[in-house]
Amino acid sequence: MVSSELPEVIGMSDRILVMHDGELVAELPAGSAEHEILGAATGAHTPGTTAAGGAR
């Protein structure tokens, strides 16, 4: 599912994959806070949220 409606994404998801600049940057659990998702989507990565290769 692709949507710009963040509450809809959070409510419908088992997990949330976030892309930034064409790269997968985070894999977050269902129910993640909007600020975590938006932080990953805007490039403000937080430790432990990157999808591949561990923390950046």
Image (cartoon, rainbow, N blue to C red):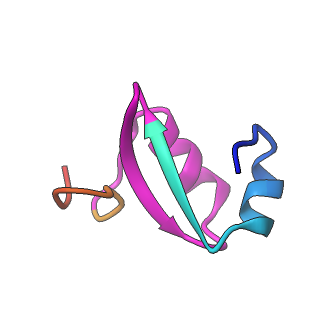
Residue 1 left/right relative to 49: right
Residue at x 63% of width, y 74% of height:
14
Q: Which residues are magenta?
A: 20-47
Relative to residue 29, is residue 40 depicted above or below?
A: above
**Which residue is located at x 40 percent, y 39 percent?**
44
Numbered label tally? 0
Q: Residue 56 appears at what percent x and percent y?
A: 19, 49
Q: Is residue 38 left or right of residue 45?
A: right
Q: Residue at x 75, y 42 (%)?
A: 3
Q: Nearer the viewer, residue 45 or 28?
A: 28
Tell me if residue 26 is in the magenta stretch: yes
Left/right of residue 9 with respect to residue 23 in the rendered view: right
Choose top left, top right, bottom left or bottom right for residue 55: bottom left
What residue sits 29% from the left and 65% below the top? 48
Instruction: Name the spot of residue 11 as percent of width and height, x first.
Output: 79, 67
Q: Is residue 50 magenta?
A: no
Residue 24 x %, y %: 38, 44
